Structure formats: C-alpha cells, structure tokens
Image (spheres, rainbow, N blue to C red):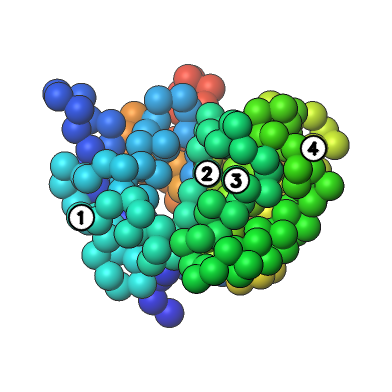
Amino acid sequence: MKPLLSVRHVSMFFGGLAALHDVSFSVNKGEILGLIGPNGAGKTTLFNVVNGFYRPSRGDVFFKDQRISHLKPNKICSLGVARTFQVVKPLQRMTVLDNVIASAFLRSRTKAEAVRTATEVLGFTGLLADRDVISKGLPLGKRKRLEIARALATSPELILLDESFAGLNPSELNESIQIIKDIRDRGITIMIIEHHMKVIMAISDRIVVLNYGERIAEGSPAEIRANPLVITAYLGVADNA
C-alpha cells in the first residue's frame, strides 16, 4: 500500500541553524501518526513544511504521490491537507458558525452549502450550541475544538493537529480524545503533535520521534516507550541498562 504522505530527506535551515536535518517518514491512509520530541525538536517546523508555510531547504514532501513541497498552503489545503495551530487563531470578531463557514467555502459553491457543512461540523465537534457566540469569548477548550472544526470544514483527507490537547482540563481532554478517534473513524488520516504522553501513546498507531531536528526513532507506542534513544532525549540521561 502506497503511503498517503511521504516526507523524504527534508532539511530546513534558518541561517546556519538546521531546524530539520534529513527527516524521512511516511503516513499511511487511515492511521493516527504521533509526532513527538522535546521542545525545539522541530515538530512544528515540520508541520510548516508539510502544509507549505516553509519550502524545505532540501528534500521533498509528497501527498498521494504528488510533490507538494513547492506549493503554497492554500493549494495544499485544496488538495486535502488541513492543519490546526498550537496557538489557536480564530477569526475573533466573527461567530463560531461564521468561522467554520469561512473554511467550508473552500469546497462549497454556495453559501447555503457552506452553512450546511459548517453546521454539521459544529455538531460533530460539540460546538453547535455555541454557533452564535463571538469566537474570542470562547474558553480555551472550545477554542481548541473550533480550530479542529475549521480544519474539518475543508473536507481534508489528512489533518495535522498541533498540540490540540495543551491546556485542557481532564473533562475537555476526554472529549477531545473522543473527537480525534471519531475523526479517524470518518476515514480521515491524522498526524498529531502532542506533549501529553499518555494521550499520544493511547491514540497513536505509530509514533515518529524528533530530537534536535533529526528523526531518532519510529515505531509502535510500545516500541517507542522502550526505546533508549527516546528515554535519553526526554530525560537527558544515558541509558545504562
């Protein structure tokens, strides 16, 4: 089976600093791939390369066998790759519904169609009761869900989730975990950055680990949990076992 997304020997330099160095991995259709690593490991930079905010200094990204690493974010989104942001960025003066309608227009030919799509997505993410709320007035947990709703309204095949669980209380965490599982059940492939290790180990089919811009490990949650390179990267100590 061909991968849905392939990252091939990607490097990203900022001046003399290598934020990413020769990173390669693939994402298979229908899976949840976790992307983890210490702060500054290059995770969000990699997302920015995949969805076109950065053009890689070296290497390429392919989506459904099409090279996309030279394309702009709007074109990549139109091909079926959506993303959320670590720092949520709703259209603050617009209602929750209008935020999602704006995203739905990527595929909708009429306003009525965009409204139908947005309303369905708000129901799916548990935000329908907040449809008329101005987005800047939402609490953090709901703003995180709105970010996911806006991405889903573009009808993606692959969604990149950047720390969608950060700052959530236990109840919100459980709700968001269920939403992620429901997204996968809809046939949407997920790549997720997350620092909450219990969450990432529970929901991921595979995990890729970055450290100092390099891929240091890849495997199942059980394999990653036992990997001495991963233990060293997170604890900062050598494994003497």
The answer to which of marks 1 and 4 sits earlier in the sequence is 1
- Label 2 to label 4, Cα distance in Å? 17 Å
- Label 3 to label 4, Cα distance in Å? 21 Å
- Label 3 to label 2, Cα distance in Å? 13 Å
Secondary structure at badge 1 equals: loop
Secondary structure at badge 3 equals: helix
What residue did someone put label 4 on? 172
Residue 5 at what x, y percent from top left? 38, 63
Which residue is at 39% across, 30% downward?
A: 41
Q: Which image quadrant for residue 70?
A: bottom left
Foreground mark, 3 or 1, reads 3
What residue did someone put label 1 on? 70
Amino acid type indicated by mark 1? His
What residue did someone put label 3 on? 99
The answer to which of marks 1 and 2 sits earlier in the sequence is 1
Amino acid type indicated by mark 2? Thr
- Label 3 to label 1, Cα distance in Å? 28 Å
